[in-house]
Amino acid sequence: MLDLLSLRYFQTVAKLENMTRAAEILQISQPAISKMIKNLEGELNVKLFDRTGKYIRLNEYGKRFLVKVDSALQTLEEGKTELLDLSERPTGTVVIFIQAGSYLLPDMITLFRQKYPEAQFKLLQQDQEISRYPAFDLCISSTPLKIPGTASTPVLTEEIMLAVPNEHRLATRKSVHLNELAEDGFISLKIGKQLRETTDSLCYAAGFAPRIIYECDEPSMVRSLVRSGLGVSFIPAVTWGGSQGSSVVLLPIEEPISTRTIEISWYTNRYMTNVAKKFKAFVEDYYKQLKEDKIKKEPINPKA
């Protein structure tokens, strides 16, 4: 009879295709894990791996079996989580795929854990090596999420403004047309970030390709370079913290219309834990408050 431990061992070996590394991760001896795999193959009456010397490779039987094992173990893990939820304890780990608004996430998590200190978080980011359809509880993004089986709700629409050094030729203007910046050097997030895709599209709509002079991994570095007078940049008016300091001027863009909508998404066919549900509601309330503060024109404390 197949047992849970054998399935977990097989899953690890199948994903690594390396007995030595699997044994190290599982903290058992290599002979023990080799014996377990042979016993499993004997019980199934098929070979799951092709062996060439000391190397192993998952074969077609193994690949098909791995799909079923992944599904079964995921179902069991969700069942365990659901039982914990029945006790109404908001505990466990919330997996968040963060594609936009990363600047605000630490503050949200800190405030949430003040109320639910046992809650834990795992963050997946765009630039990590993740699958095309990563497993997450919640995703925060700025464009429609093109992942099958997900639903979304918008939480904030914000203006994208142009940040220029206070000595820039346009700094005294009340607003600008984006094509006036066609010859300027832009400071931008690197390719692959959602905001970069959005702002590149704005430039193309204005009739030019942006001349990127600095690419950065983090919004804080973008802000710092603009403050140093090294170029201009796009700044989301709410999620990037409002005022950028006296050395930077934020200008509304008249044309093209420059906004983005932040949304929160989740898988509709996966069980959502109590703690994930509570954090989803918390995120929606958090962005609602940001929107109200913006309407009241209350300053948002910059954390650059």
Image (spheres, rainbow, N blue to C red):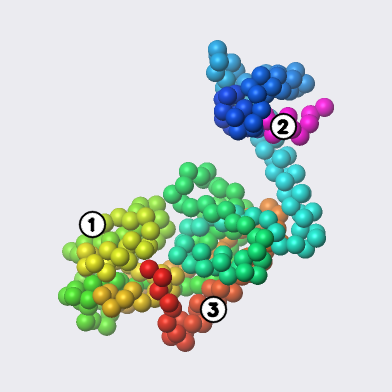
Instruction: Name the residue carrying label 3.
Output: 289
Query: Residue 72: x percent and y percent?
Result: 73, 39
Q: Secondary structure at mark 2?
A: helix
Most common SS among magenta residues: helix
- Quadrant where the N terminus sits is top right
Instruction: Name the residue carrying label 1.
Output: 213
Q: Which residues are magenta?
A: 1-10
Q: Earlier in the sequence, mark 1 or mark 2?
A: 2
User: Would you call the spot at circle 2 few (<14 residues within 10 Å), some (14-19), or many (20 or more)?
Assistant: many
- Quadrant where the C terminus sits is bottom left
Q: Secondary structure at mark 3?
A: helix
Query: Residue 133: x percent and y percent?
Result: 55, 47
Residue 253 located within the stretch drawn in magenta: no
Q: Is residue 264 above or below residue 11?
A: below
Residue 207 in view in this figure: no
Instruction: Name the residue carrying label 2.
Output: 7
Q: Residue at x 56, y 66 (%)?
A: 110
Q: Secondary structure at mark 1?
A: strand
